[in-house]
């Protein structure tokens, strides 16, 4: 298999149907307790309106929709279909987190691991500008890097197996940094898919951003947020440990 021919972003297109098996909603429960606490501690009680940019399959948001009124944005219509199946009460929009403007304000804006697809500082500025354009005055923005330059582990291999009634999936992730001087890293995913007793193998290439923590803090501050850091429960990646909560400055 020629890995140089691995097609990018298949997970958000023809392989999106595998997402509920690959990363089921229950896997997010411990991590999203911290996100819920961050929202409640700053917003107080009530069914506040929140926005998630880059919602993906909606698995993270599904742990919050029982308490908050949610709106979701993602580039992938296929992933949004997964999210709609979880909760029809969520308002869904197809859009790019770097440029979308919904013309509406929210108590809080969130970006989970979709933030990792920001590959340059220009991407960061655009995304954080979107995050700053949507909270009410004094509202908050919550995000969490999957990893930062200080915690990234090169040549890391992760794997798991899951199934539903029709499909058994074993997936393997190989994380590596082809060029330590730039701001991107790669993850190659292998999917071993068994359906109707037949096995097929697919692969998918992620290119994601890698920046020092200070870059995250500086970019959020420049967008108009006062930022607090707090520990976060590890998600499906052992490098996840930091929750960043920004409060929009009144003059921003």
Image: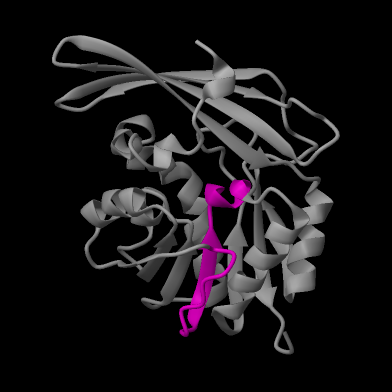
Q: Toward the viewer: 105 or 31?
A: 105
Identify the magenta region: 97-117
Name the residue located 14 percent from the left edge and 26 percent from the top edge: 165
Name the residue located 56 percent from the left edge and 37 percent from the top edge: 234
Q: In which quarter of the view is residue 186 placed?
A: top right
Relative height, residue 120 to residue 224 (above, below): above
Indicate whether residue 133 is drawn in magenta: no
Q: In which quarter of the view is residue 14 placed?
A: top left
Quadrant where the C terminus lies?
bottom right
Relative height, residue 38 to residue 200 (above, below): below
Q: Across the whole image, how many numbered discs are drawn on residues?
A: 0
Relative height, residue 6 to residue 113 (above, below): above
Name the residue located 78 percent from the left edge and 59 percent from the top edge: 217
Relative height, residue 191 to residue 53 (above, below): above
Indicate whether residue 100 is drawn in magenta: yes
x and y percent of residue 189 in the render?
49, 24
x and y percent of residue 212 in the render?
81, 45
72 left or right of 181 in image: left
């Amino acid at each position: 298999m020629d890995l140089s021919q691995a097609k990018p972003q298949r997970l958000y297109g023809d392989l999106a149907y595998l997402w509920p098996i690959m990363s089921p909603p229950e896997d997010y429960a411990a991590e999203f307790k911290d996100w819920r606490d961050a929202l409640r501690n700053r917003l107080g009680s009530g069914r506040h309106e929140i926005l998630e940019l880059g919602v993906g399959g909606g698995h993270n948001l599904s742990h919050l929709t029982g308490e908050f009124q949610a709106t979701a944005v993602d580039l992938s219509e296929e992933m949004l279909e997964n999210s709609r199946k979880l909760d029809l009460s969520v308002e869904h929009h197809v859009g790019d987190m770097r440029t979308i403007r919904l013309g509406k304000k929210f108590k809080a804006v969130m970006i989970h691991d979709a933030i990792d697809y920001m590959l340059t500082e220009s991407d960061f500025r655009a995304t954080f500008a979107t995050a700053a354009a949507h909270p009410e005055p004094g509202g908050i923005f919550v995000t969490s890097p999957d990893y930062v330059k200080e915690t990234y582990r090169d040549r890391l291999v992760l794997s798991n197996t899951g199934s539903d009634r029709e499909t058994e999936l074993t997936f393997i992730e190989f994380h590596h940094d082809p060029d330590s001087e730039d701001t991107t890293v790669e993850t190659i995913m292998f999917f071993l898919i068994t359906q109707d007793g037949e096995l097929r193998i697919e692969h998918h290439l992620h290119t994601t951003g890698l920046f020092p923590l200070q870059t995250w803090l500086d970019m959020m501050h420049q967008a108009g947020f006062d930022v607090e850091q707090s520990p976060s429960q590890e998600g499906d990646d052992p490098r996840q440990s930091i929750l960043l909560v920004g409060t929009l400055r009144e003059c921003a």
